[in-house]
Image (cartoon, rainbow, N blue to C red):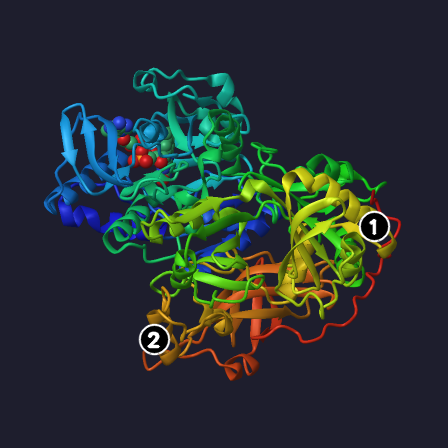
Amino acid sequence: MAHYSNSLYERLEEETGVKTGFVRTGSLCLAQNQDRLLSLKRLASRLKILGVSCSLLKPREVLNLHPMVNVHDLVGALFLPGDAVVSPPDLTLALATAATAHGVQILEHTSVTQVLVEKGHVTAVETDRGTVECDYFVNCAGQWAYELGQSSEVKVSVPLHGCEHFYLLTKPLSEPLPPETPVVMDLDGRIYARAWNGGILSGGFEKNPKPIFTEGRNQLQIHTLQEDWDHCEPMLSALLRRMPSLEEAELQQLVNCPESFSPDGRCLLGESPVAGGYYTLAGMNSSGLSLAGGASRFLAEWISFGYPSANVWPLDIKRFGSLQSSRTFLRHRVMEILPLLYELKVPRWDFQTGRQLRTSPLYDRLDAQGARWMEKHGFERAKYFVPLGKDLLALDQSKTFYKPDWFDIVGAEVKCCKEAVCVIDMSSFTKFEISSSGDQALRFLQRLCANDLDVPVGHIVHTGMLNERGGYENDCSVVRLSKNSFFIISPTDQQVHCWSWMKKHMPKDPQIHLEDVSWKYTALNLIGPRAMDVLAELSYVSMTPDHFPSLFCKEMSVGYANGIRVMSMTHTGEPGFMLYIPIEYALHVYNEVMSVGQKYGIRNAGYYALRSLRIEKFLAFWGQDLDPYTTPLECGRETRVKFDKEGGFLGREALLRQRERGVSRRLVMMVLEEHDPDHDPWPWWGEPILRGGDLVGATTSSAFCFSLQRHLCLGFVTGGLLAGSPTPVTPDFLSRGDFQLEVSGQLFPAKARLYPFTSLPVQQRPRQAPLEITGLHGK
Ligand SMILES: Cc1cc2nc3c(=O)[nH]c(=O)nc-3n(C[C@H](O)[C@H](O)[C@H](O)COP(=O)(O)OP(=O)(O)OC[C@H]3O[C@@H](n4cnc5c(N)ncnc54)[C@H](O)[C@@H]3O)c2cc1C
């Protein structure tokens, strides 16, 4: 988005005749330590994929670009020559001038009081100067967007919170810097600085920010926010350390100006799930200027064509729901988000605030057994379980781009999944039930899903819900509970998006009933060859594949509890069962499973083990590997697409066209070679994939495969162009390719695969710690 904004702003002055203050200065991100440098190398890789030019510099090279920077404590820097600065008010005027020239009418000094919605769609906005009828409304009210969303009868959640932001201005320096001097970002010092009117403008993102306006908007207060020199002292010291010659400079002003931040530091874009035609573009997280051009383009495309031209799921407002909109949650989270802008982000970091919002009934039980937690869509999920006697503090503080401290722990959980049986609490999954009096639910799902759902009762179907372009809006498992009722299991963070997608396409038939039952069921995943023994003992029913075939669901009793939905699938490719348990039975069933499972070597496991297992089996997950711009044909899922089913399905025509053209982009598994997991940086996601030295794609997820004792990554590669047309990615293209993966700036050879391993070697023991599967903390 910033890239597009940059090119838009560059030509705006010529187009409008209004000055924008655009100067191509470039920018310098400084690194004071090796970890920061590594993160800049990762950023350089990402920029390479996006086609943004940048280069890594040695400290002394920084001096050639910026004479005032003290480089003595630096280990390197990243230079982005294309970056630019603008004058915000001038740019705003230029944008308004350009919009007006294209027919836009701007009403100044006009307040929107509420947005009117009828039959689920926007019809008008009420303002203090009258009502304006409209089909579309965009809430881009900055830090007032939350309040504006709440002010209508149909309440729209726009989760953001205001925070004070400080910057200082100096008077002109005795030797002013040329205006094209690069902007400096000293991330470890938490400050930025740029040349401004002959002096310096410098601000920062402090560790202890000051949230404001939790109680609601206050237009007047904004102009009376106080300077706070004590609060800014650490940033001022950091600035003087970075630019010691500023000791001589005279300060002109310390400005305190509020900004708004979303719960994950990314903006809030797109159509509201509760009101059609109600769009949002807010929560700009201190990057409103750099992102405005690109974000607005996506928004305009979305409104005009029904979808933006690229995958914007990470920005989609539907990644949040009302559950992230409590004022307390937002106030606490903003105190974490603002510092995070310049924080060193290592793989698998987790938010510390807003935690324990949604938990499984087993939370305390698992916590007492050593669970270390991560959060998804407000739900606590166990990452792994720390065995008794391990140094908990060290593990909690483990922040690294290299081999993490939990390596052996997760290795032991994986081993137990393969050789015995593990339990993973997967209650965070989104679950819907849909039913109808006649076959309306079936007909609706048949239209929405690419796979055939007209299967015998009890069967489970893995299917995508595709858009008109054939891309994944949802990747789910659907269970046929009865002739006219279905149970749909979707990824955790699909709760709002999937609900809204289904509602949008659902016929207006009062006989179809859709319910979000996510909170009603605790989901336990029993993974491993002994899972069937545990369940057989608890249910007095044979659980062998002959009696309980794969992808099958039965309501059974487990222990004393009746009505447990037992499903023969594990989301890992390993044998086992998912148990969907009405929440009041959760503790009982868990206790019984752990008790009976002891003699089979049962133990708890977490999501890190699951990740390793699913990537080893080449199982792509929505949100990480799949998105609305990825089709089933691009990830080898043709078998889940029933082109010939009666009535067709949404996305069919696009898939037929793609099949005819050939698939020029494919999900592949990359097997990393000559990579030492003990000493080399680990892949995470977003690593460039090269073929014969040319960039052909990027990874989407990765994990250490304990069976092969090496890293596996999933990612997409493109086949390149032949006479201007994309060429298909064929097995030949992959097998003959000389592939490499760029991990934190280092190149490693890799083998590309289109299919999972048919057999994997028995897991080897790591050199240091022996893997234990017995003597575990069961009941
Ligand atoms: C000190 C400081 C430095 C910054 N530096 C940078 C930087 O270097 N680079 C960068 O990219 N970004 C920077 N930003 C961030 C950037 O300024 C913001 O992200 C951006 O201004 C947000 O734009 P917006 O349009 O979303 O909101 P705003 O600019 O706040 O605009 C919202 C508008 O909506 C109006 N409004 C509110 N409620 C209503 C209503 N009910 N009816 C009608 N109108 C309403 C408001 O009056 C306001 O005009 C900085 C911000 C600050 C404070």
Quadrant of the drawing holding the C terminus: top right
Say few, some or many: other residues with alpha carbon within 10 Å of mark 1 (under 14 / 14 to 19 / 20 or more). Answer: some
Whole-percent x, y for residue 353 in the image: 57, 32
Q: Amino acid at mark 1?
A: Val
Quadrant in which ligand 1 is drawn: top left
> Pointer 2: residues within 10 angstroms few (<14), some, or many (20+)?
few
User: Residue 67 occupies which quadrant of the picture?
Assistant: top left
Please report contact status of discs 1 and 2: CB closer than 8 Å, yes or no.
no
Q: Is residue 53 left or right of residue 22?
A: right
- Residue tagged 2: 657
Secondary structure under tag 2 reads helix
Indicate which disc residue 584 carries. Answer: none
Disc 2 marks which amino acid? Arg
- Residue 774: x and y in percent read 87, 53
Q: Nearer the viewer, mark 1 or mark 2?
A: 1
Identity of the residue furthest to the front in this view: 437
User: Is 155 placed above or below 569 here?
Assistant: above
Q: Does residue 294 appear to the left or right of 410 in the view shown?
A: left
Q: Is mark 1 within 8 Å of ligand 1?
A: no
Q: Quadrant of residue 128?
A: top left
Measured as percent of width and height from the top left, residue 422 is found at: 75, 54
On the question of residue 150 being in view, the answer is: yes
Answer with mark 1 or mark 2, whichever residue precedes in sequence.
1
Which sits in the foreground, 287 or 602?
A: 602
Q: Which mark is residue 596?
A: 1
Who's the residue at 40% across and 15% down the image?
A: 226
